[in-house]
Amino acid sequence: MTLATEFDAPTAQSLERAIEQLAGRRIAVLTGAGVSTDSGIPDYRGKGAPVRTPMTAQAFLSSEEARRRYWVGSHLGWKAFAAAEPNAGHRALAQLETDGIATGVVTQNVDGLHVRAGSRRVVELHGTMRRVFCTHCGQVFDRRDLAARVEADNAWIAIPENIALGPDGDVLPESTAGFRIPECTVCGGMLKPDVVFFGEFIPAEKFREAEQLVRTSDALVVAGSSLVVNSGIRLVERARRRRIPVIIVNRGDTRADARASVKIDAGTSDVLSALAHALPRAR
C-alpha cells in the first residue's frame, strides 16, 4: 500500500507519523461509535447524526411507560442492529491482535462487532446488547431468545423494512399502545438490557480491566470516538501520564486532540486497515 495514493497528503503524513510512533510497540485500542458507522450503525455525534434523547437509568427503572417505549423501540431496531456485520476496521483490529501488536480493544460500543470480527480481548465498557438480565433475581437471557418471546407476545407489531436505526439499536416508535413488556420467566421481575444507560456508572471492575489493558501497553490508539464520555477521556489521561504515544483517528474534533501525539482526521476503516498492513513490517 502506498499511503500517498490511498489518502490525501495531510492524512498520509499524519498516518506516516503514527506508524513511526507505533512501530515496535504493543498497542491498546479504544473505540467508539465511529468504528461501526461503516457497518450501518449510526454515530451519536457525527455529522448528520440525528438529535436523540437517550434513555436514562432513572427513567427506565422508575417508569413503566419509559420501559414500554424502550422495549418497543429496541425490538423494532433489533433485527437490523443484529444483522450488522463487522467492517474492515473491526477486522483490522482483530488482525493486529493476532499479529501480537494490539493487546486488546476497549470499546464504548454495545454492538458486539469486535467479538464477531475475531478480537479475543474485548472490554465492553458500556455492556452489550447480546444479553438481558433480571434486575430482581439476576437471571441472564440471550437477546435473540427474548426477541422471539417479544414477537410471540406482541404478534401485532410489524417491523418496517426501512427504519431510522439508532446507535444503540433502537428506533423511535410511532406508538407503544398495547405493547406487552417482557418479564423475567424465572421470577416475573423487571428485565434490563446488559448495557450502561445514560446516568449509570460503568461497573468498577470493567473500568479496572480497561485501565489494566492501557497500563500493560506501550501506546494507545483511539478510533471513532469524540471522547465526550468521561470513561474515554480518563483512559487517554492514563496514557498521557505514562508518556506513551496517543494516536487519535476520528472524523472531526475530539476532547483530547490537544493531548494526542498524532491526530488523523479520517475514516477509521481505512486508517486501521492501513495500520494493520504497515505495522507488522515496521516492527
Image: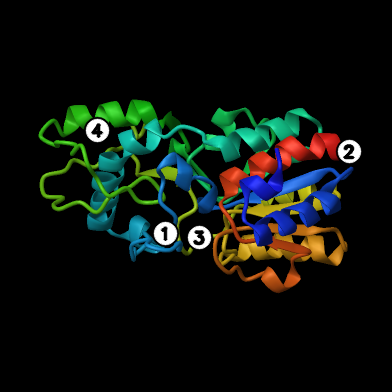
Residue at 27% in and 57% down:
66
Horizontal arrangement in the rendering, residue 178 relative to residue 58 (left or right): left
Residue 136 in sight in this render: no
The kind of residue tagged 1 is: Ala
Tag 2 and tag 3, C-beta contact below 8 Å: no
The residue indicated by pointer 2 is 283
Dot 4 alpha-carbon crowd within 10 angstroms: few under 14, some 14 to 19, many 20 or more: many
Toward which corner of the image does residue 282 lie, by quadrant?
top right
The residue indicated by pointer 1 is 57
**Gap in angstroms between the C-alphas marked 1 and 3:** 6 Å
Q: What element carries label 3?
A: loop
Horizontal arrangement in the rendering, residue 155 relative to residue 196 (left or right): left
Camera-side mark, 2 or 3: 2
Q: What element carries label 1?
A: helix
**Gap in angstroms between the C-alphas marked 2 and 3:** 41 Å
Residue 280 in the image: above or below residue 19: above
Dot 1 alpha-carbon crowd within 10 angstroms: few under 14, some 14 to 19, many 20 or more: some
The residue indicated by pointer 3 is 200
**Gap in angstroms between the C-alphas marked 1 and 2:** 45 Å
Q: Which image quarter holds the N terminus?
A: top right
Whichever of labels 1 and 3 marks the residue nearer the N terminus, that label is: 1
Q: Which image quarter holds the C terminus?
A: top right
Tag 1 and tag 3, C-beta contact below 8 Å: yes
The kind of residue tagged 4 is: Val
The kind of residue tagged 3 is: Glu
**Gap in angstroms between the C-alphas marked 1 and 4:** 21 Å
Whichever of labels 1 and 4 marks the residue nearer the N terminus, that label is: 1
Tag 4 and tag 2, C-beta contact below 8 Å: no
The residue indicated by pointer 4 is 150
Q: What element carries label 2?
A: loop
Q: What element carries label 4?
A: helix
Q: Where is residue 37 in the image (x, y as percent from the top left)?
A: 46, 47
